[in-house]
Image (cartoon, helix red, strand yellow):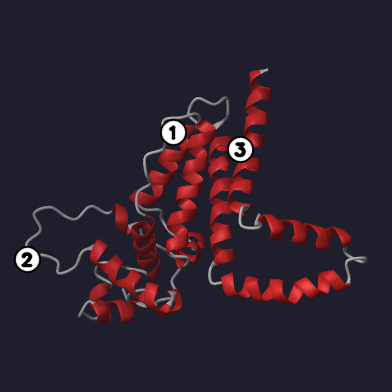
């Protein structure tokens, strides 16, 4: 069977495939971590669109066909890159569930912000790897004793991770654009404050207090406040 091309969207869960024991022949030249590192170096330098099986193979001094022995599909390359880029989660603080989940979400944001292209990979169809599943394990452990269903606990993580990753995508490369927008919008709001009084007042106040960069903390706090209200309702 011919190997899948670079647009294939199905992964085979290669991160969960144990290497065969006692296999005869030469030792494999490459490891999944080594392949992931090579792909990550390309993405860091040139962007995710520059990462192809051909480019990764060339950087490793091998051929595209040889690389398919390790990664049968492009989605497998995405999965090993994402697993390596995110890494394992840090230990959560020994505190209540709200503090633990706040630390979890902030840590996820920080990791993804170091490599914003990881957000794109997280949203592509793939089989989560061991490190990615460790994030689930960590977050679910923080909610273990809450009076919530398993589905609700998973939904909490979905809300927090969605908020954190959407902000990474929004902020990636947008610092200069945001400053430019503020420069253009400021005079407009001043000139037309009578037509847009709430918008003008909000932007002015937020700018003076430098509050517009707190979307991460604000969103996390609001999600967890909603969870706390549900927990209180269940307890009553």
In the picture, the quarter occupied by the C terminus is top right
> Considering the numbered disc 3 on the image, is that residue within a helix, a strand or a loop?
helix
- Name the residue beneath numbered marker 2: 25
Tell me how far mark 1 sits from mark 3, CA to CA.
Answer: 16 Å
Q: Mark 3 points at which residue?
A: 224
Mark 1 lies on a secondary structure that is helix
| 171 in relation to 64, above or below | above
The residue carrying pointer 3 sits among few (fewer than 14), some (14 to 19) or many (20 or more) residues within 10 Å by Cα, namely some
The dot on residue 141 is 1
Whether residue 4 is situated above or below residue 11 in the rendered picture? below
Quadrant placement of the N terminus = bottom left
Mark 2 vs mark 3, foreground winner is 3
Q: In this view, does 123 lie to the left or right of 128?
A: right
In 3D space, how far apart are the residues under numbered discs 2 and 3 (Cα atoms)? Answer: 54 Å
First along the sequence among labels 2 and 3: 2
Residue 99: x, y in percent? 51, 35
Residue 174 in sight in this render: no
Label 1 with label 3: CB-CB less than 8 Å: no
């Amino acid at each position: 069977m011919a190997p899948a091309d670079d647009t294939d969207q199905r992964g085979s869960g290669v991160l969960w495939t144990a290497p065969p024991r006692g296999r005869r022949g030469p030792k494999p030249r490459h490891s999944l971590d080594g392949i992931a590192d090579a792909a990550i170096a390309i993405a860091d330098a040139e962007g995710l669109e520059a990462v192809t099986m051909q480019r990764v193979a060339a950087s490793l001094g091998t051929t595209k066909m040889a690389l398919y022995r390790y990664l049968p599909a492009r989605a497998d390359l995405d999965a090993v890159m994402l697993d390596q880029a995110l890494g394992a989660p840090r230990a959560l603080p020994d505190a209540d569930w709200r503090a633990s989940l706040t630390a979890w979400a902030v840590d996820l944001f920080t990791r993804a912000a170091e490599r914003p292209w990881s957000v794109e990979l997280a949203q592509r169809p793939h089989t989560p790897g061991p490190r990615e599943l460790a994030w689930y394990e960590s977050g679910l452990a923080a909610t273990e004793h809450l009076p919530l269903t398993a589905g609700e606990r998973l939904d909490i993580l979905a809300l927090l991770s969605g908020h954190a990753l959407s902000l990474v995508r929004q902020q990636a490369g947008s610092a200069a654009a945001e400053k430019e927008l503020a420069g253009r919008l400021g005079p407009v709001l001043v000139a037309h404050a009578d037509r847009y009084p709430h918008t003008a007042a909000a932007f002015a106040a937020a700018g003076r207090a430098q509050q517009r960069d707190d979307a991460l903390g604000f969103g996390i706090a609001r999600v967890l406040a909603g969870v706390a209200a549900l927990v209180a309702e269940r307890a009553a």
